[in-house]
Image (cartoon, helix red, strand yellow):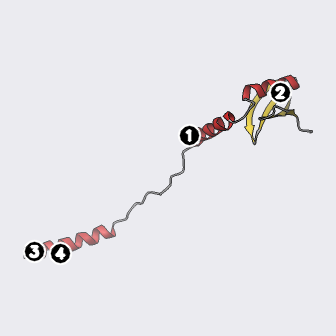
Amino acid sequence: MKNRMFFIRFIVSGFLLAAAPVHAQPAYAPPSREEQIQNQLLENGAEESRTRVGRREASELAREAFEGRVLSVRLEDGYWRIRMDQAGNVFNVFVDANSGRVSRPSE
């Protein structure tokens, strides 16, 4: 009798465990916003280290070529994009990250 009750409990508990929902974790969790920013900074730093013209030198070259105040400097596709302000007029100056050639797109 004891064996029969044990066997019934064993079978019922097996069915209950099999019917319980399983919460699977995703195989890949997307990075948080902080991780995305950190990864972008690391990538930009690595890309900047491969250029001949650095951020500060690009900013100085742009200031020598055009009067104005530098607002931001960003590396994009092998060119430093420098946003400048001259008496309220905001414009872009591009400096080649390898040659240092300064250019301003025609507007």
- Real-space CA distance between mark 2 and mark 3, rounded to the nearest whole angstrom: 89 Å
Reading the image, the residue beneath label 2 is 62
| In contact (CB < 8 Å): disc 3 and disc 4 | no
Nearest to the eye among marks 4 and 1: give it: 1
Mark 4 or mark 2, earlier in chain: 4
Disc number at residue 3?
A: 3
- Real-space CA distance between mark 3 and mark 4, rounded to the nearest whole angstrom: 9 Å
Residue 23: image location, x then y, percent:
40, 60
Mark 2 or mark 3, earlier in chain: 3
Q: Residue furthest left?
A: 1
Q: Tag 2, which secondary structure?
A: helix
Residue 16: image location, x then y, percent:
28, 69
Mark 4 or mark 1, earlier in chain: 4
Nearest to the eye among marks 4 and 2: give it: 2
Reading the image, the residue beneath label 1 is 34
Crowd band around label 3 with a 10 angstrom C-alpha radius: few (<14), some (14–19), many (20+): few
Label 3 amino acid?
Asn
Disc number at residue 8?
A: 4
- Real-space CA distance between mark 2 and mark 1, rounded to the nearest whole angstrom: 32 Å
The image quadrant of residue 77 is top right
- Real-space CA distance between mark 3 and mark 1, rounded to the nearest whole angstrom: 58 Å
